[in-house]
Image (cartoon, rainbow, N blue to C red):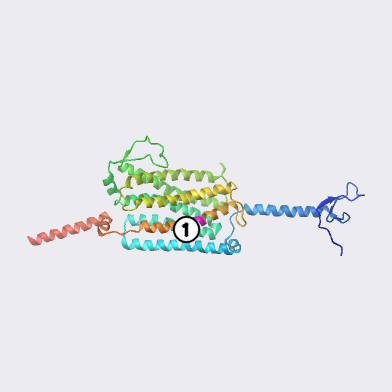
């Protein structure tokens, strides 16, 4: 049997052909066996088409959940299962904490703020888990996380004030006392700034500084969601004509302004609230902020600059968001367990009486005075 040589893709011209004749392509070592060069053109078009389809696929939007499930290997199934269990356990721990607060803490603003702040990590873990399973919903889950944490920033400031019994008792405790305003992230380098004095006007400005973020971020997020559904908003478009750069810049300035009052109030009350473990609580809050805001921004910038390669069915940006969601689930799971340690505390009867609303306390005092008056009348 004659052994055929492997084909070599080379273009040859048969002798005797004029200049207008079609050149041929030799597929074997024997130059007598030739085929038209159109076959070579077709092979080249197939290769170019495959490359173009890969480029289009890697630059597309996040894949559907069905595509993710079809491509899961055994290690990926194990990873998905473990991360989902972490998110579920984090929510169970948070629900148990809510039940404890409902039973042990009176219905005051203090209890409400503790619920909001301690629920940051479970909520972020839940939204990250949904985004991991359904990549197309990543935009919605990221916006939900951003809106909730903006509210948490305002609630954390309220929680520090409520530990003293509210605005009035806080002013009564710190009225006309100096407070340092050269704190981060705005004025940490401006050491020459004078000390301010706690007053009702300053309290209003401090609360307004955090409230503007809790109000502005949901509004901008809704606007972003509308643009995204319309196909106008894209995280990859950072040009001056695109809305992403302007929305993100506005949110960055608003966030920096909101963090400044938090630092001012914390530096004022950290010595007074050592027994309430305010320093570990503030540390957990800062870690949560760094992980939810800066970590996502760093990963997104790395993906846009080409530092994260395409891994079908995930584009570089989708893969970066995918990595961020998996990291957030593990990180928020740990923070949830630590939050349960620092936010769960036992209150004695005196502390419970101090947490009662002023109206109810006044009614109890009036009732007590009325009882004393009736007893004195009976004696007379």
Front in this rendered view, residue 202 or 31: 31
| Residue 227 coordinates in the image, percent (x, y) | 54, 50
Quick one: quadrant of the N terminus? bottom right
Front in this rendered view, residue 329 or 4: 4
Q: Is residue 92 magenta?
A: no
Residue 373 appearing in the image: yes
Please tell me in which quadrant of the rendered image residue 263 appears.
top left
Residue 236 appearing in the image: no
Front in this rendered view, residue 232 or 355: 355
Left of 301 or right of it: where is 146? Answer: left
| Residue 135 coordinates in the image, percent (x, y) | 55, 57
Front in this rendered view, residue 352 or 308: 308
Left of 108 or right of it: where is 60? Answer: right
Relative height, residue 145 to residue 199 (above, below): below
The residue that disc 1 covers is: 125
Q: Which residues are magenta?
A: 326-331
Q: Kindly identify the residue that appears in the image at 51 percent across and 60 percent down.
A: 130
Q: Kindly identify the residue that appears in the image at 15 percent across and 60 percent down.
A: 371
Toward the left, the furthest residue is 380
Predominant SS along the magenta part = helix
| Residue 303 coordinates in the image, percent (x, y) | 57, 49
| Residue 133 coordinates in the image, percent (x, y) | 54, 61
């Amino acid at each position: 049997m004659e052994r055929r040589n492997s084909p070599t893709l080379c273009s040859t011209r048969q002798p005797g052909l004029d200049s207008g004749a079609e050149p041929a392509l030799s597929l074997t070592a024997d130059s007598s066996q030739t085929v038209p060069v159109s076959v070579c053109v077709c092979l080249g078009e197939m290769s170019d088409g495959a490359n173009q389809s890969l480029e289009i696929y890697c630059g597309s939007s996040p894949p559907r959940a069905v595509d993710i499930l079809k491509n899961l290997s055994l290690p990926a199934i194990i990873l998905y299962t473990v991360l989902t269990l972490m998110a579920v356990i984090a929510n169970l721990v948070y629900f148990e904490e809510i039940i404890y607060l409902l039973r042990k803490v009176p219905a005051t603003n203090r209890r409400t703020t503790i619920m909001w702040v301690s629920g940051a990590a479970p909520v972020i873990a839940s939204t990250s888990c949904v985004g991991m399973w359904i990549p197309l919903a990543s935009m919605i889950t990221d916006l939900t996380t951003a809106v909730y944490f903006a509210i948490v920033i305002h609630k954390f400031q309220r929680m520090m004030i409520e530990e003293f019994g509210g605005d009035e008792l806080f002013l009564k405790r710190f009225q006309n006392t100096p407070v340092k305003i050269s704190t981060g992230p705005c004025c940490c380098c401006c050491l020459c700034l004078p000390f301010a004095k706690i007053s009702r006007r300053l309290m209003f400005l401090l609360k307004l500084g955090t409230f503007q973020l809790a109000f502005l971020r949901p509004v901008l997020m809704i606007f972003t969601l509308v643009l995204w559904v319309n196909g106008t908003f894209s995280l990859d478009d950072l040009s001056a004509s695109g809305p992403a750069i302007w929305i993100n810049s506005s949110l960055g300035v608003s966030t920096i302004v909101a963090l400044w009052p938090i630092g001012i109030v914390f530096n004022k009350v950290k010595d007074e609230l050592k027994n309430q473990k305010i320093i570990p609580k503030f540390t957990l809050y800062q870690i949560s902020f760094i992980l939810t805001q800066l970590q996502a921004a760093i990963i997104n910038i790395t993906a846009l600059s080409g530092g994260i390669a395409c891994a079908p069915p995930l584009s570089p940006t989708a893969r970066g968001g995918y990595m961020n969601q998996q990291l957030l689930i593990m990180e928020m799971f740990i923070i949830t367990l630590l939050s349960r340690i620092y936010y769960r505390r036992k209150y004695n009867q005196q502390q419970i009486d101090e947490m009662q609303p002023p109206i109810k306390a006044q009614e109890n005092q009036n009732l007590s005075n009325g009882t004393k008056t009736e007893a004195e009348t009976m004696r007379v």
